[in-house]
Image (cartoon, grey):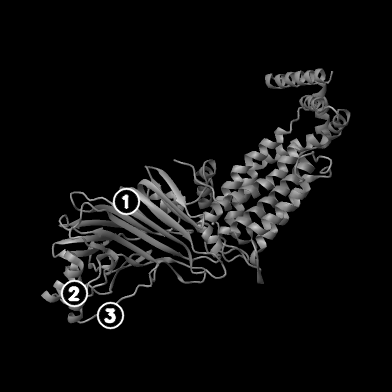
Amino acid sequence: MEEKKIDIQSIIGFLLIGGILLWMLYNNSAEEAQIEEKQESEQVEVNQAQNAPAPEEEEEITYTGQDSTALAAAQQRLGAFGYSATLPSATQNTTTISNDVLEIKVDNKGGYISEARLKNFKTFDSIPVYLIKDGNASFNLNFTTRDGRTLNTENLYFEPELSKSGGNQVLSMKLKVSADEYLEYRYVLQPDDYMMGFSIRSQGLDDVFDSNQNINLDWKIKGYRHSKSITYENRYTQLNYGYDGDNDGDLGRGSLEEDEEEDVSWVAYKQHFFTSILLTDTPFETANFRSENLVEDEEVDTLYTKAFATSVPLELQGGELTYNMNWYYGPTDYKILDDYGRNLDEIVPLGWGIFGWINRYIFIPFFAFLSSFLPSYGLAIIVMTIVVRIILSPVTYKSYLSQAKMRILRPEINEINEKYKDNPMKKQQETMKLYSKAGASPMSGCLPALMQIPVFYALFQFFPSAIQLRQKSFLWADDLSSYDVIANLPFHIPFYGDHVSLFPILASIAIFIYMTMTTGQNMQASQQPGMPNMKFIMYLSPLLMLFFFNNYASGLSLYYFVSNLITIGIMLVIKNVIVDDEKVHAKIQANKQKPKKQNRFTRKMQEMMEQAEEQQKRGKK
């Protein structure tokens, strides 16, 4: 499976986390209104037939009765498919199928879904969640007939037939050439399921379709806004697709993106917490994708997030169409999508590589376990944070112990720096000897800190993707999946917003306190030439977090706040109870008295430095 791309917001978040950890590392080492024509008289239909425009500009034919004159007029316009325009179903009617979680309305015109409502979800302003409504989506087959007509199914009328098969609702939509010849869309809705069976097949149309021309499937959706922050929602709104077995890709981070792929098995239009997916049992040979960002100004463009489009050429088998597919209209829930076993869990942005692995096999199951018995999701976040910090406490201990050793050795390192200030090679050599004798190493603190990065970044991906947090309140936050608000501003601050969130403020304060603690009183003394000003980073990192997380999920800010509070507590215990500087100093002195057997790497490095020093002396001579 190819690695996931990282969007710019994830990169910023990763760099922010890395910036915060950089301080530890340094101390250790130094994003059609449909228009219908009114029903006309049969005579007008005849007149229109006599003055018909070119096939690519075909106009809608409404039902006028099944008499020979009307049929002739319709066939003059639509060829063999003129029969469909003479049926009673050639009117703007819909058929509804629903279960406990999903309600679908299918329009006679086009035979496609005109409404898709998720029954158990509301938008941020308490409106039912619609993935399709008021013409924001279209599904069309474009084809050429043997008599040279180019037709679009979205302009033609299908005849509905609703039935039941066991507990399933079956809706057959037929675009007829005759009573027994047709193009059929077949929908099968099972009880309590977001996944719906869907098939496209034709019967008796092998002498109607032009087999030398492609039949093109076009599926489009403009995603409705569902969340409080359209910018935040748009950040996680994208087009995903599966191809070539278990591979997957995505696009939608830029203002306009296009892509093409082969052997495509599913296409998903993800709107952060809700997703529309088209799956096929017979992979599409090729598919073209397009994603366009509709939000240029978050203060003005507040209805739609992104516009998605997919174009697929369909293949005829024996002159007929036969495709077994599925529609999914439902939440972007990892467990639900994963249970289908069709690689749909890749739609949930859990991170690539080890980050995704940690989320899939550790954080998602553990958080589900905690939330199954704790009274609130906020408490589940706190408990999970405590457990994570306890598990990582040995890493924190090793990191602090390394800091203590380096702090104790600082006077001796300063002496070496002063003594060999004109001989950088000798200075480095003597410093390495001191580290070796004392049993200390700057890298011994770097490695424990680096070990925490996968955990921090995995959680950075987990919380914005956890639909369980959506519209769940905790303390003053009314939705842990969105930002909390303690004050609304009368103006908009770039990169910050028009509100003040408290959890990011608390998290920033906690990070600042932690950095101050790890700084000690030797910051300036430990500043190395050419290295970034760590005092500047100490102030910059909390400020970046304050701005960056003001529009992020409050659950994520809650985690970082609690995590840093616990880390501060652990550091205080280690500093005042566990680690005794005098004992550490005594142990260092004892280690210095012991003969130290150099390993092969250290010995080789020392030999290389000695040779370099000797060459330097010869060069001076």
In the picture, the quarter occupied by the N terminus is top left
Spatial CA span between label 1 and label 2: 42 Å
- Going from N to C along the chain, the mark reached first, 1 or 3, is 3
At numbered mark 2, what does the secondary structure look like: helix, strand or loop? helix
At label 1, counting other C-alpha atoms closer than 10 Å, the crowd grade (few under 14, some 14-19, many 20 or more) is some
At numbered mark 1, what does the secondary structure look like: helix, strand or loop? strand
Amino acid at circle 1: Thr
| Coordinates of residue 282 in the picture (x, y in percent) | 29, 48
- For disc 1, the marked residue is 280
- For disc 2, the marked residue is 50
Q: How many marks?
A: 3
Spatial CA span between label 1 and label 3: 37 Å
Query: In front: 14, or 610?
Result: 610
**Quadrant of residue 153 in the image?**
bottom left
Q: Disc 2 or disc 3, which is closer to the eye?
A: 2
238 horizontally vs 160: left or right: right
Amino acid at circle 2: Gln
Q: Is residue 78 above or below residue 418?
A: below
- Going from N to C along the chain, the mark reached first, 2 or 3, is 3
- For disc 3, the marked residue is 38
Identity of the residue drawn at 59% across and 54% down: 381
At label 2, counting other C-alpha atoms closer than 10 Å, the crowd grade (few under 14, some 14-19, many 20 or more) is few
Q: Is residue 124 above or below residue 572?
A: below
Query: In front: 220, or 359?
Result: 220
